[in-house]
């Protein structure tokens, strides 16, 4: 079992474990949206970034193998600046409609925004509008303005339920989670689970 050091604290990691997983198992808090212990690593939310001692840049902890002797810092000035910028980006086009959101009070975006950003949006441009009530299936509605494109729901249908019924179409600010046109999300008997693994209130 490799021994790593997080903020100087010795942590015994599991074989083939990543730094994020090892930190959480040791009770060390790190923010994350896209990572999930039962899903593949996407590394697209970037918020779990840490700094390896001696390096002048940050790297994501979910895709960093916990190798013997590795030393990382989770709360340097660089890490906190980077996390703040990630939260600013993720909330750039978010409607911030927490007052009417079912997930308010248990939303990771809300929690991490206050923990690592807490400032009003720095953008002077109007938010990009997207579909508010898109029916993914007969039972599940997607609010694309709340979606942070973590891809957890997409990976769930590819890796767990195996229906491959969800994907992300378009690119950049136009990206949208959408179901395949054959209606296979409707017949995916595990599909309702995506509501629980969505880290924000985008799936209803
Ligand atoms: Fe992630 Fe939720 Fe958007 Fe799916 S709907 S990509 S789980 S934020």
Image (spheres, rainbow, N blue to C red):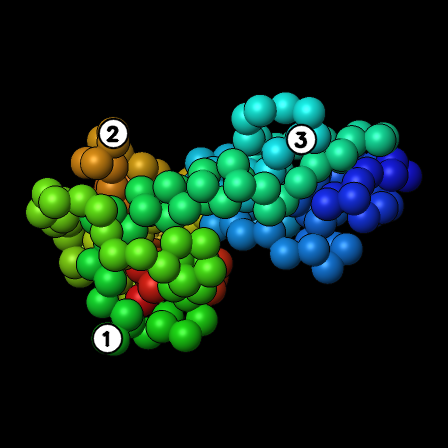
Left or right: where does residue 154 sit relative to residue 35? left
Q: Label 1 neighbourhood size at 10 Å, few (<14), some (14-19), many (20+)? A: few
Give the answer, above or below, for where 24 lies relative to 44. Answer: below
Q: Rounded to the nearest whole Å, what is the CA distance between mark 1 and mark 3?
A: 40 Å
**Within the image, what quadrant is residue 98 found in?**
bottom left
Tell me residue 81's x, y (percent): 45, 41
Tell me residue 25's x, y (percent): 74, 55
Dot 1 or dot 2, earlier in sequence: 1
Tell me residue 202's x, y (percent): 31, 59
Secondary structure under tag 2 reads: loop
Dot 2 or dot 3, earlier in sequence: 3
> In this figure, what is the number of numbered marks?
3
Residue wearing tag 2 = 171
Which residue lies at the image location 53% right of the left edge and 41% below the top edge? Answer: 77
Left or right: where does residue 92 sit relative to residue 157? left
Left or right: where does residue 3 sit relative to residue 166? right
Residue furthest to the left in view is 126
Give the answer, above or below, for where 56 lies relative to 173. Answer: above
Give residue 52's mark: 3
């Amino acid at each position: 079992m490799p021994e790593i050091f997080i903020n100087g604290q010795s942590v015994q990691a599991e074989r083939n474990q990543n730094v994020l997983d090892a930190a959480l198992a040791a009770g060390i808090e790190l923010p994350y949206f896209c990572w999930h212990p039962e899903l593949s690593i996407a590394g697209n939310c970037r918020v779990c970034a840490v700094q390896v001692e001696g390096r002048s840049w940050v790297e994501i902890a979910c895709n960093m193998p916990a190798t013997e002797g590795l030393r990382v810092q989770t709360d340097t000035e660089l890490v906190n600046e980077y996390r703040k910028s990630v939260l600013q980006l993720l909330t750039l086009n978010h409607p911030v409609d927490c007052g009417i959101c079912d997930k308010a009070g248990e939303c990771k975006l809300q929690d991490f925004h206050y923990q690592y950003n807490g400032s009003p949006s720095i953008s002077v441009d109007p938010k990009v509008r997207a579909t508010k009530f898109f029916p993914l299936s007969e039972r599940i509605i997607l609010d694309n303005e709340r979606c942070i494109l973590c891809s957890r729901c997409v990976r769930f249908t590819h890796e767990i339920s195996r229906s491959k019924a969800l994907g992300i179409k378009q690119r950049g600010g136009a990206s949208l989670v959408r179901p395949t046109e054959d209606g296979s999300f409707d017949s995916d008997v595990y599909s309702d689970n995506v509501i629980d693994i969505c880290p924000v209130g985008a799936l209803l």
